Image (spheres, coloured by chain):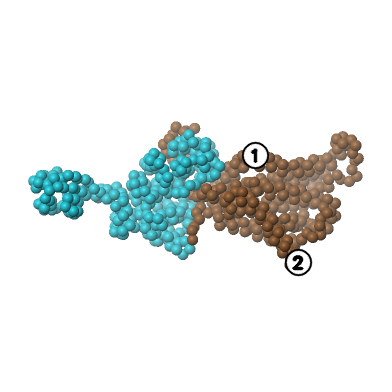
Amino acid sequence: MVPAIELDNLSVSFNHRPILKDLNGKFSGRAIGLLGPNGAGKSTLIQTLLGFHPPTSGAARVLGLDVRSQIQEIRQAIGYMPENDSFVAGMTGIRLVRMMAELSGLPPADALERAHETLFQVGLGEARYREVGTYSLGMKQMAKLAVAIVHGPGMLILDEPTNGLDVHGRKRMLEIIREIRDSHETQIILCSHLLRDVEECCDEVMILKDGVLVTYCNLEAERQTNRKFIQMETRGDTCVFLSRIGQLGCELAVNGNRKLKMVLPEGIKTRDLYRIASETGVQIRRLDYKRDSLQDIFLKAMEGSLEGSNGRP
Amino acid sequence: MGVHRQAYHPYKGPRTSERWRFWILARYAFERVFQSRILVIFYVICFIPTVIALSAVYLSHNVDLLISLFPQAKPPDAELVPVNEAFFLLLMSIQASLSVFVTALVGPGLVSPDLSNNALPLYFSRPFSRAEYVLGKLSVLFILLSMITGAPMLLIYLLKSALAGSQWFIENIHLAFAIVAGSLLWVTLISLMSLASSAWVRWRPAAAGMLFALFFIPAGFGTAANEIMRMTWGSLLNGIVLIGTVWNSLFFINDPVGYARAADNLSDMPDSIDFLPAWSAWLMVAALCALSLFLLNRKIRAHEVVR
């Protein structure tokens, strides 16, 4: 499978001010989340991949195509949903989407058919003959998505797709993104501030901070790694209990009197914990499998604790 | 229509050639332009001088028809409507004036709405370049304005040739060249200026006003400079004098005042009009086109970089 994005010492500067600094890596996920605080360089990276800004040094490839020399081919292969309101004034939804499909190279008849299909798909079927300027914020987001996918791109770049959406709109948007991901025909780059959106849609995540790639990880692998991370709440005297658990080879961390965190070694089951608790007169009031959430990964990345680790390519 | 297919599926069909993709933009823009009733009415009005001129040329070659229509009229001794340089210059001036209003109605709606609604990333994230965008928008104005400037005058030239014979056609071929070159130059200049003002002034009415301001305010400064400094170079800021000088050079009129006086229809031309050397007018027109392109290049970008 051709990597969705390849970065080779990519640097981008504006007016001698470095925005992206020596980014490296091959990113092959079906859906890659792009995270980072404001000013981290996420939008600049997207715009560089779209050919809006030339790299100052280094190289970047999208679907194996070089952003310097093959930008037309790249633009043929991608769909882009910008963050801000973007529409052509005075145009109905159907005309806007059809025109954009034609600009992507579809013949007029195919463009019209795809425009109808796509608008129904994003839930704007009934509103397709209304001017886009009269749409609500959520409808405009959906119209932007329709414009981005109407030509069936090989890669979809979504910049804050759930901005301004209500609960139903957000759910529908994420469903569509997952549906596109699961079609196995289109790779997705999802840039969002909402970690939950990224967590729900993406299988890989890259985190930028101050123009530097601080983390790239496979979310599913992270979940697997932390499968046996257990959080427990107890009542009673835990001294003997802790000592017995320690003898089993568990890594333990005590948080206050009653809260415990532990990683179970191979072969030890939770039923062993209940047995020891029973024998030592300790009540287990709560027991959860805990794993590093995306939020934990993000916060660790921001603190710099994960730099150079976690499967960084 | 496959609207029942509500699941995402990629497009595997044929793709159109990239060469003519700019025309898609023009096609959609034309559809929008002609939704304006005011523009349609005004655009029809723009053809009235041409219809009058065509009728006059036709009647001047069909005196019998003229006498049958107006029995009391005497047969003219000379040609009723002399179709020469002065005729075409006059018609070109009238049509050019009308074309300014058409440009003011159409031009501001071409670029400024795209900029104010942030539509450019949608265009430029596709296999569609900035040059194609400008070409697409320019071709809308270019075609609309050519249809009311160069095209009708060429039609008159061809009608006159058909009525007067091939000898007239050959002897006056320079007129056809002047008509084509003059109107192309005018249409290109005004279209580029209109697009540039539309790109820099995002409010449509202001962009329309800007076009008129670009013609009249520098002209006022130019005239004042001419009066104060007793020179003629200030006329370089006067768009009307500028394009008039270029047209004169295309029609090989080296002494415009003398020529105008020789032609009866322009005998009231005042002495005070400041004529420029033709080369300076050509240079200024080229500079204005280049400046407009430069301004468009600055503004027509997918994203503005905040420095």
Q: Which mark is residue B161?
A: none
Q: Chain of mark 2?
A: B
Considering every residue shown, the one lying at the far left of the view is: A279
Q: Is residue B238 visible?
A: yes
Q: Amino acid at mark 1?
A: Arg
> CB under 8 Å between callouts 1 and 2?
no
* Numbered disc 1: secondary structure: helix
A20 in relation to A191, above or below: below
- Mark 2: few/some/many CA within 10 Å (<14, 14-19, 20+): few
Look at the image and tell me in which quarter the C terminus of chain A lies. bottom left
Which residue shows up at 59% across the image and 58% down it? B294
- Check disc 2 and report the residue beneath it: B230
Q: Residue A92 at x, y = what percent? A: 53, 39
Within 10 Å of the Cα at label 1, are there few (<14), some (14-19), or many (20+) other Cα atoms?
Answer: few
Q: Are marks 1 and 2 on the same chain?
A: yes
Task: Give the x, y percent position of residue A231.
Answer: 20, 48
Which chain does the cyan colour mark? A
Could you tell me which residue is drawn at 57 percent across and 44 percent down? B24
- Name the residue that disc number 1 marks: B37
Please indicate, yes or no, whether residue B250 appears anywhere in the rendered image: no
Image quadrant of residue B25?
top right
Is B234 placed above or below B51 here?
below
Q: Seen in the image, is B114 located left or right of residue A4?
A: right
Who comes first in sequence, dot 1 or dot 2?
A: 1
Position of B119 with respect to A172 (left or right) is right
Which chain comes out brown in the rendered image? B
Identify the residue at horizontal 66%, vertical 42% (top origin): B39
